[in-house]
Amino acid sequence: MRYISTRGHAQSQSFCDILLGGLAPDGGLYLPESYPQVTPAELAEWRELPYHALALKVLQKFIDDIPACDLKTLADRTYTAQTYRWCRPGRDAADVTPLTTLEPDLHLLELSNGPTLAFKDMAMQLLGNLFEYVLQKRGETINILGATSGDTGSAAEYAMRGKQGVRVFMLSPHGLMSPFQRAQMYSLQDPNIFNIAITAMFDDCQDIVKAVSNDAAFKAKYKIGAVNSINWARVAAQIVYYFKGYFAATQSNDEQVAFCVPSGNFGNICAGHIARMMGLPIARLVLATNENDVLDEFFRTGVYRPRATAETHVTSSPSMDISKASNFERFVFDLVGRDPKVVKELWARVDTGGAFDLNGTPHMAKLPDYRFASGRSSHADRLATIRTVWEKYGTMIDTHTADAVKVALEHREAGVPMVVLETAQPVKFAETIREALNREPSRPAELEGIEALPQRVEVMPVDVQAVKDFIVRHCG
Ligand SMILES: *Cc1c(COP(=O)(O)O)cnc(C)c1O
């Protein structure tokens, strides 16, 4: 399987070549040069497989430069009942992504049972094992530099802790994450994990990361890398649970299902789009946003208008607070018939702060073929949905999942099971749970009292040179 850029860069790449990189050299995103297809016989066989074995089957369709036996070891090691043990009482952790049925044809697919209690673990845990494997083969090392306001940074640290050849330098805004999030990250004692709390806002942390990465000489010398959401391997890993969720919600492969996905950067739902392109019988992909409704607007109107950072709402489903959706370019590449000239032309506008409108183009007529629907949710909707799901089904859901349930209920079709992707556990957003239910969310017993554990964090001012010096000091 070769990978091409959405902007047409000529040189196709293998999976391992794009694994450690980010954007393609022309600023585009990598995609397989064609989508592998799943035959009815394969679907029948896959229905019976446990998660780790299903993951191997799906990943083998996209990865042909890692020997099958090695890939099997990596998948087996990643998707264990032990790693995904924080499921609801009565569920089987060996399912990795158990299905919770709220009522006939309305389900939650639990994607947040991993170490950081959010769905980003699903892909990041595999990435950690893939990085270690490829770096070891090549005799290389990497220093991952990132900025986080919560979920991504902790998922990266828990995936990379103890991995050979990998160090993580993670910047976070000092004092601005919740006590639980701080405890999750800063209590890690692994010598390859470095937490740096910057006495400023998240945007300042991100600016420091950009400044360090823009110093090409420093970047090359200290092998600075990233694990952001445009990484192709993360999307590939996410395709697996669409298959798993389909099998769990149906009896036979003649049935169709709908998935509802709480969306920000379009990474999660992009994997659903690809699963459908591979032949998984998906009737509809329902995209849910919060008040930051750039994507809902596109699917309703054909206009993609990324917002300025200052226009981005700070909401109670913060992991979806985005102004532009970094993975959206992958879908648009398919929508415009995989013509990189069109993508380049559209993103020439987006990258200079503009918008595009597909109305009146032949692409707009194709949009219904991709079977998307969309909707948005507000803080009041979120509170009401958390309450309803708690009172009606006795199930507590987090704020992001609530946005998706709200929108899912607006898009149900008779006879088509609706599977809502559950992307985080309520304990991560306790303040809003208290506001909605006037009670404390439960947390896994093992995580009781983590706020009291000793923390390992370096506090620094907004100073690019100080961060560079810190990296140099800790690279040996
Ligand atoms: C990252 C995240 C999302 C959004 O996923 P995208 O891939 O960015 O669309 C939704 N919910 C939670 C809890 C997240 O952490």
Image (cartoon, rainbow, N blue to C red):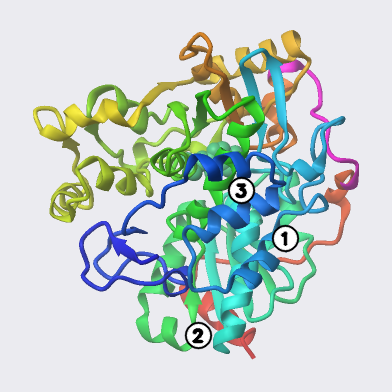
C-alpha gap between disc 1 and disc 3: 24 Å
In this rendering, the answer to whether 440 lies above or below 333 is above
SS at mark 3? helix
Left of 7 or right of it: where is 195?
A: right
The local crowd at label 1, few if under 14, some if 14 to 19, many if 20 or more residues have their Cα within 10 Å, is some
What's the residue at 66%, 12% (across, down)?
104
Q: Residue at x 23, y 52 (%)?
A: 351
Check the image and report above or below for 28 versus 243: below
Can residue 286 be seen here? no
Question: Do residues under tags 3 and 2 come within 8 Å of each other at their CB atoms?
Answer: no
Front-lying residue, 401 or 352: 401
Contact check, label 1 and label 3, Cβ < 8 Å: no
- Dot 3 beta carbon under 8 Å from ligand 1: yes
**Residue identified by numbered label 2:** 222
**Residue behind mark 3:** 151
* Dominant secondary structure, magenta: loop
| Separation (CA) of disc 1 from disc 2 | 32 Å
Q: Which residue is mark 1?
A: 76
